[in-house]
Image (cartoon, grey):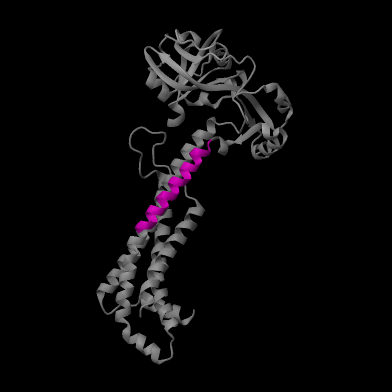
Amino acid sequence: MNLPLRIAVRYLFARKSYNVINLISGIGVAGMALGTAALVVILSVFNGFNRIVSDSISDVTPDIVVRPASGKVFEPDSLAFLTEDDDILVLSSTLEDQVFVSYEGRQSLARVKGIDLVGEEESAFRDHVVNGEWLLRRGDVPYAVAGVGLAQSLGLSPRFLTPMEIFYPSRTLAPSLANPSATLRKVSLRTGGVFSVNAEVDAKLLIVPIQCMRDLLEYPTEVSALEIWTVPGMSAEVCERLSGQLGADYKVLDRYRQNESVFKMMRYEKLAIFLILIFVVVIIAFNIYSSLKMLVIEKQGDIGTLRSLGASEGMLQRVFLLEGWLVSLLGMLIGLLVGVLLVWLQDRFGLVPMPGNFLVENYPVVLKGLDLVFIASGVALVGWIMALIPSRKL
């Protein structure tokens, strides 16, 4: 142990002449511990909610989606070779667009997605049905399954027999100023079920048989996308391979690129929370500045003695810099231990329940090692800066 660090450790644990210095130092340690523990707990809770959102998105999101690079639709026959890829387990065609939906005098815009028989059988939406059943056809009668938000806004229910009406402007008929409704194509469907995934999807998505969308949009064979589920662990390799095979005419999207805005928003929100909590730690760290300032005043006799023994100004500054930094590091270490313990207890025993009706009974928590590294680095940097300022003015 070098001399400045040895003296700093002695100053840290030795009793001071004035109890107020001990008190302020103790408050500094407790404050840094509290701020660090809050960072660990709050970021872990945020990770838990992010995991719920990510899992709900990933559950109903295919591993890979192939879309045309330009235009809305393409002929799926040109990609028939995909059925021969051994790494592809499921290949489903979809046709979707923004349409106008009317039901019992209520109207709304909706994103209607038509899926084929393969998608109907393999869709993960069937596991998210909260009312009715996963039903898109009964004999020759088509049905629709709506998001819970859209169903509430339109008053849809599987118990009602009145069909909803979906409208879309005809692509083949010229617009009529005298009778605009004459150029609208319409299909009628009953409600088979209502699903719930997340607020964004629930508010706008309506799932129907693909043939209904073909009749509505007047696309006899075209599709808007191919949805692909791969062998577990092979999605990244298949995505890269398809990108090379299909070239610039198609966009090959993995799960992240399909929901890029959502994942970016979650990262930005987490960064904002981290910066806000670090700012709180900065405010708490002013206790370290105060205690170190008072310690410098108290130790003027020791400073004079060390100078007479040949200690340089740089050495004296390092002594008090290290003493102030040790206060923050001690608080940081205690805070990390307390924060990790609280997260473990919440994950194991569910100490804090979620209020109201939610997907989980207790606040979800996920502890990430990288978060601990950023927390430790941020708190240590704040403590070092707060110790550096008074130590340079001996």
Residue in front for this viewpoint, 101 or 281: 101
Q: Residue at x 44, y 60 (%)?
A: 378
Is residue 269 highlighted in magenta?
yes
Q: Which residues are magenta?
A: 259-280
From the viewer's perspective, is 20 left or right of 206? left
From the viewer's perspective, is 214 left or right of 108? right
Residue 194 locus on image (x, y percent): 45, 21
- 22 over 143 or under it: above or below: below
- 18 over 384 or under it: above or below: below
| The quadrant where residue 228 appears | top right
Q: Residue at x 46, y 22 (%)?
A: 110
Is residue 391 highlighted in magenta?
no
How many numbered marks are there?
Answer: 0
| Whether residue 198 can be seen here | no
- 276 over 216 or under it: above or below: below
> Majority secondary structure of the magenta segment?
helix
| Whether residue 278 can be seen here | yes
From the viewer's perspective, is 141 left or right of 221? left
- 350 over 84 or under it: above or below: below
Residue in front for this viewpoint, 87 or 71: 71
From the viewer's perspective, is 363 left or right of 61? left
Residue at the extreme front of the image, as rendered = 177
Residue 342 locus on image (x, y percent): 40, 51
Placement of the C terminus among the 4 image quadrants: bottom left
Residue 268 locus on image (x, y percent): 46, 46
Residue in front for this viewpoint, 179 or 92: 179
Q: Residue at x 39, y 89 (%)?
A: 307
Residue 91 locus on image (x, y percent): 65, 26
| The quadrant where residue 16 appears | bottom left
